[in-house]
Amino acid sequence: MLPARRKTATLGALTGAQLIVSLALGIGLGRVAPEARVAIWSALAVGLIVSVATTALGLAWAQRELSRTLRSLVASVQSREPRPTLPEDTEIAGLAGSVHRMADELDTALRSLAAERDRFEAVLETMAPAVLALDRERCIATANRSARRLFALRDSWQGRPLLEQVRAPALHELLDRVAAGEPETAEFELPSPLRSVQARASRLADGGLVVVADDVTDIRRLERVRRDFVANVSHELRTPIAVIRANAETLLDGALEHPEAARRFVEALYRHADRLTRLIGDLLDISRIEAGKRVLSLEPLELSDLTTDVILTLEQDAKAKSISLHSEVDPGLYVMGDLKALEQVLVNLVDNAVKYTPAGGHVELSAARDGEQVRIEVRDDGPGIEPQHAKRIFERFYRVDSGRSREAGGTGLGLSIVKHLVEAMGGSVGVDPRSPRGSIFWVTVPLGDVPEDAESAA
Ligand code: ADP
């Protein structure tokens, strides 16, 4: 098939030849008879009309061919269909090749941009710091998962003003400062739930702002706990040391000469030295547990053996206060625990019960199976613990009545050691009020398998 351009040219050439012939004939018409001249003019007119019509038809056909080719080219580029087959040596084929190459390159560039964007979004979304991007009007353009959680963004946050979504004056002041080119970090608190946030902000070339924020609540809490702990330890150590020093001075200043008074001062020296020893022991214990250096070895333990030993250990103290002390644990009940740790737990709880129950009171130690756990209870009819203290008495150095605790030789660390040890054995600990008065301190520990030799003996 001839290309459209060439067909049009051929038609044009034919029409031109006809015109030249007609002109030549016209020149020679002067020598022809009038009747023949009319016939010739008629023939010439018909020839002219035919050639003009042929040319117009040829042009229309060529134009239709051209636009059909262009349309199929555009359609194939738009729909990413295979290229249409075009004659190779035409300008249209060249143009089509260029358009397709450009479309392919554009396609590759778009694909790699989309992959890049997906990667960027995935990284942004999984980043631990909260990232907020704001436009010039301080409306939220982007917020990753951490930012949505930290700033508790409400639904449809996208495009909403930050001021409307996050009520933290310090954050908005930070943005004002950064927009004015000033320092770019700030620490502030977000309300409900209360969070401490450390944020850095920077300005974008288009006038927008980016905020990168970290939730430092846990770090600040730990710092506070550490500060309080150091302050508490110094305070706890200072008191007995001051008493020991004062008593020693009094003895040296002459009390030694008076045996009665001297005995009292030496007894006080002993009591406070003893308290210091216990305090240092508890502190070492707690730091070893918290540092993971106290390794527990869990084994099946017959509970009644253990509770009998605990009662024996504290019998004298209870008797001295006329407190009745009993244990009621079925033989054959096994727990999975560490012997020393569980003994320390029970001694601590029974010792507290004896310490805080007034003379003439009652303390009972009991245990019963509760599903796959064993619940051990220490009941007393002492002063009890009010609900506002119940949540906190397992914290280090937390005391309901500091005076009474110190008077009773307490360090304020016993229950926090109990909690650590019980949790390390896979159990839990708590306190409930007892009716009509007193407390029930309870721990749960996993049920232990009855050893084979114990089974066959039974
Ligand atoms: P402490 O060495 O002061 O006894 P603990 O950690 O063992 O420290 O106990 C924390 C506080 O809990 C005590 O100071 C006391 O106020 C309170 N407490 C503990 N056991 C009892 C109890 N059985 N009855 C009343 N209060 C108790």
Image (cartoon, helix red, strand yellow):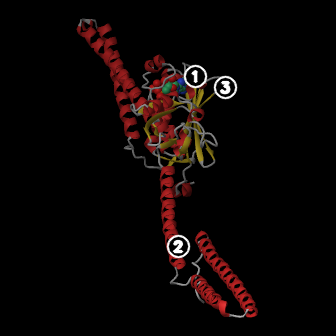
Q: Nearer the viewer, residue 441 or 11?
A: 11
Q: Residues within 10 Å of mark 2 (few under 14, many from 20)?
A: some
Q: Say whether disc 2 or disc 3 marks the residue closer to the N-terminus.
A: 2
Location of residue 76 in the rendering, given as x and y in whole percent from the top left corner: 60, 74
Q: Nearer the viewer, residue 12 or 398?
A: 12
**Is the distance from the Cβ of mark 2 to the nearest ligand 1 atom less than 8 Å?**
no
| Residue 313 visible | no
Q: Which residue is mark 3?
A: 435
Disc 3 residue crowd, few under 14, some 14–19, many 20+, Cα 10 Å: few
Residue bearing the label numbered 1: 382
> Quick check: marks 1 and 2 in contact, CB under 8 Å?
no
Which quadrant would the N terminus be assigned to in this image? Answer: bottom right
Camera-near label (1 vs 2) is 2
Secondary structure of residue under mark 3: loop
**Could you tell me how far apart the alpha carbons at marks 1 and 2 are, in whole angstroms?**
91 Å
Residue 22 % position (x, y):
64, 88
Q: Amino acid at mark 2?
A: His
Relative vertical location of residue 108 with respect to residue 399 in this rendering, above or below: below
Hey, what amino acid is under mark 3? Answer: Ser
Task: Report x, y in % for residue 438.
Answer: 60, 24
Query: Where's residue 404, x and y in %?
Result: 48, 18
Q: Quadrant of the C terminus?
A: bottom right
Q: Amino acid at mark 1?
A: Gly
Of the residues tagged 2 and 3, which is closer to the observer? Answer: 2
Numbered badge on residue 100: 2
As drawn, 307 above or below 75? above
Find the distance from the CA under tag 1 to the CA under tag 3: 11 Å
Secondary structure beneath dot 2 equals helix
Residue at the spot 57% in from the left edge and 78% down from the top edge: 83
Q: Earlier in the sequence, mark 1 or mark 3?
A: 1
- What residue do we see at 41% from left, 33% from top? 185
Q: Out of 140 and 190, give the one closest to the viewer.
A: 140
